[in-house]
Amino acid sequence: MRLRNVTGSREMIEESRFVVHEPAAWKGKWGDVFGNDGPIHIEIGMGKGRFLMNLAAANPDINYIGIEKYSTVLLRAVQKMEAQELSNVRLIRMEAEEICEVFDKGEVAKIYLNFSDPWPKDRHAKRRLPSRQFLARYHEILAADGRIEFKTDNAQLFDFALEEIAPAGWKLEAMTRDLHHDERMLVGNVMTEYEERFSSMGNPICKYIIYR
């Protein structure tokens, strides 16, 4: 999807108190950022922030960190936070490849991957967020009993993601290829902007939950 540049978006993000500007400095100390010892949940590729903010509003005892590499997109989340401030949400503008520099071993309780870029060319497979290369990174930062939840409307990406689980040393806890018609997995589901759009078009939503 082509992103429209917003002039001054980086500058506006740099001035925001909701964005952590030197995240590597807080590695192993994210509880200090939030001022509590609640669990840390992160969303990688958070988009405009609707999913994360709705989760945070419903779960005030959990700390949420949204990671987004595009300034233009992250700015929308910043604007949402300005309209509805949530003390248990912080945002980071960074590349997903850098997560091990930002979070310590076992520091994260849950990781959400929602409607990630499919990187359709085979030579780009290692850039896909549910790839074995990224699963190795998640292994480094996720708590021993942690979980990864992945949602997509891209059937080919979901097939790829399923194939990566076992070789990467992970296990499948639950999965569905039609989330909105799966009563068990739909319980407590929080929709993203993309999920609402794609499901309204009749696209089935795939989801898995994995652990080690």
Image (cartoon, helix red, strand yellow):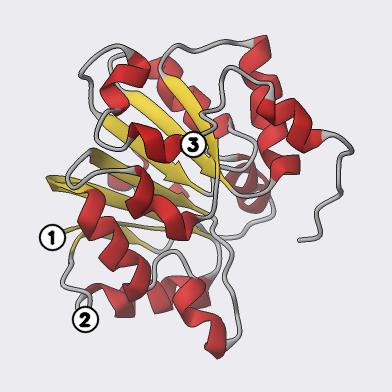
Residue 110: quarter of image: top left
Q: Is residue 133 above or below residue 75?
A: below
Residue 85: quarter of image: top right
Q: Residue, x 55% and y 68% (percent of image)?
A: 154
Q: Residues within 10 Å of mark 2 (few under 14, many from 20)?
A: few
Q: How many angstroms separate mark 3 from mark 2 (CA)? A: 28 Å
Q: Earlier in the sequence, mark 3 or mark 1?
A: 3
The residue pinned by badge 1 equals: 212
Q: Which of 15/181 is in front?
A: 15
Q: Earlier in the sequence, mark 3 or mark 2?
A: 3
Amino acid type assigned to the residue bearing label 1 in the image: Arg
Q: How many angstroms separate mark 1 from mark 2 (CA)? A: 12 Å
Q: Residue, x 23% and y 27% (percent of image)?
A: 39
* Residue furthest bottom in the image: 122
The residue pinned by badge 3 equals: 66
Q: Is residue 190 above or below residue 157?
A: above
The residue pinned by badge 2 equals: 167
Expressed as whole percent of the image width and height from the top left, the position of residue 105 reads 19, 47
Expressed as whole percent of the image width and height from the top left, the position of residue 89 reads 46, 22
Expressed as whole percent of the image width and height from the top left, the position of residue 62 reads 30, 22
User: What kind of element bears circle 3?
Assistant: strand
Q: How many angstroms separate mark 3 from mark 1 (CA)? A: 23 Å
Query: Nearer the viewer's eye, disc 3 or disc 2?
Result: 3
